[in-house]
Amino acid sequence: MKSLAKERPVWLAMGAMLLAAVLALWLLLHPELISGLPMPLRLPVIGLGVWALGAAFMQPMGLELRRHWQRRATTPPWSLVALGVFTMIVLVRALWLA
């Protein structure tokens, strides 16, 4: 049986998944938000996006990684920080290009 202290609020996981889905759709419609960056900046942003969006979809699906550092990187608070930073980058780029 899982400890109640380890369980995360459902709304937090579902909110992160909804935000990740909206970001993914937005980037499908406007890929220039990332593709317009110079290559030295584009690759880290793509990596951050893969981490943030992937982690946001993993938790609600009940997927967990085996290694401690990977599990820690894909669960809150680190996954939420990555999602927040990636969201801010996309929003700033959208406002900059508007």
Image (tube, rainbow, N blue to C red):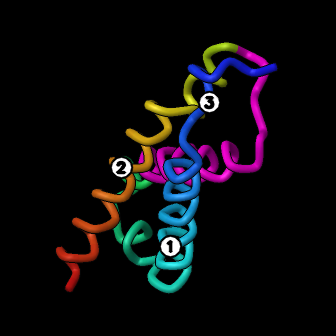
Q: Residue furthest top?
A: 68
What percent of the width, then of the height, locates residue 9?
54, 42
**Residue picked out by circle 3:** 7
Would you say residue 45 sits in the magenta stretch? yes
What amino acid does circle 1 point to? Answer: Val
At horizontal 56% and vertical 49% (from top left) the residue drawn is 13
What amino acid does circle 2 point to? Answer: Gly
What percent of the width, then of the height, locates residue 64?
75, 31
Contact? badges 3 and 2 (CB < 8 Å) = no
Q: Which residues are magenta?
A: 43-67
Would you say residue 94 sits in the magenta stretch? no
- Labels 1 and 2: the sequence-earlier one: 1
State left or right for residue 4 relative to residue 65: left
Q: Nearer the viewer, residue 14 or 57?
A: 14
Mark identifier at residue 84: 2
- How busy is the neighbourhood of tag 1: few (under 14 within 10 Å), some, or many (20 plus)? few
**Residue picked out by circle 1:** 22
Mark 1 or 3, closer to the camera: 3
Contact? badges 1 and 3 (CB < 8 Å) = no
Seen in the picture, residue 4 relative to 26 is either above or below; the reply is above
Disc 3 secondary structure class: loop
Seen in the picture, residue 71 relative to 16 is either above or below; the reply is above
What amino acid does circle 3 point to? Answer: Glu
- Labels 1 and 3: the sequence-earlier one: 3
At horizontal 22% and vertical 65% (from top left) the residue drawn is 92
- Labels 3 and 2: the sequence-earlier one: 3
- How busy is the neighbourhood of tag 2: few (under 14 within 10 Å), some, or many (20 plus)? some
Residue 82 picture quarter:
top left
